[in-house]
Amino acid sequence: MTVASEKTKAWKRANSDWAREYEKLRKRRIHADPERRDKENETQRRYRESLTASQKEKYRKSMLARHRSRMLSDPDYKQRHRAQQKRATARRRGAVGVGEPIRRDLLYKRDRGICHICLRPAGAEWVMDHVIPIAAGGRHMWHNVAVAHRECNQRKGARQIHLF
Ligand SMILES: [Zn+2]
């Protein structure tokens, strides 16, 4: 749900197979990186919030129509959809907080915009730092992320390379 220019849209229509593959690849790359995934989710959330009620309704209807036709015509899609629903149900029943997106705006508020490494205001260019790095077994979860300066985050990363 990115905002594409008319030129991009026309190109995508003319090269739909290739465009679809490319989009899949792009999404896979984003979702492999928890920080980029959260940023992407936030961008999309902001975009959704900016839509008017009638735009939302129009989008919902077109997505539903596409979903229905694919459920009928594409067995792979149907199978993927079923599996997705099973995972969603499992998430609702247990595993609270696992794989939950971390909202940058809420994190900034929680930490009052203070870098947890140098304890100075982190400013607008702050980054999400994993207190226990992912590489050291830390989880991408609310209690393991904190606001930091990019420089502090990089210095910390460099220091930790010597520790391992
Ligand atoms: Zn700092």
Image (cartoon, rainbow, N blue to C red):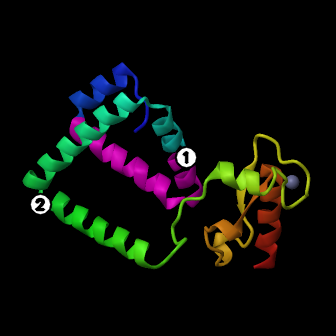
x and y percentages locating residue 130 in the rendered image: 70, 65
Q: Earlier in the sequence, mark 2 or mark 1?
A: 1
Of residues 53 and 143, the one drawn nearer to the viewer in this rendering: 53
What is the number of the mark on residue 73? none
Q: What residue do we see at 53% from left, 39% from top?
A: 46
Measure the C-alpha gap from mark 2 to mark 1. 32 Å
* Residue span colored magenta: 16-41
Q: State the residue position of label 1.
A: 42
> In this picture, is 81 found above or below 48?
below
Is 62 above or below relative to 67? Answer: above
Residue 104 position in % (x across, y down): 65, 51
Residue 116 appears at what percent x and percent y?
A: 84, 61
Amino acid marked by disc 1 = Glu
Establish if 126 lies above or below 87.
Answer: above
Residue at the spot of label 2: 75
Which is more toward the observer, 50 or 4? 50
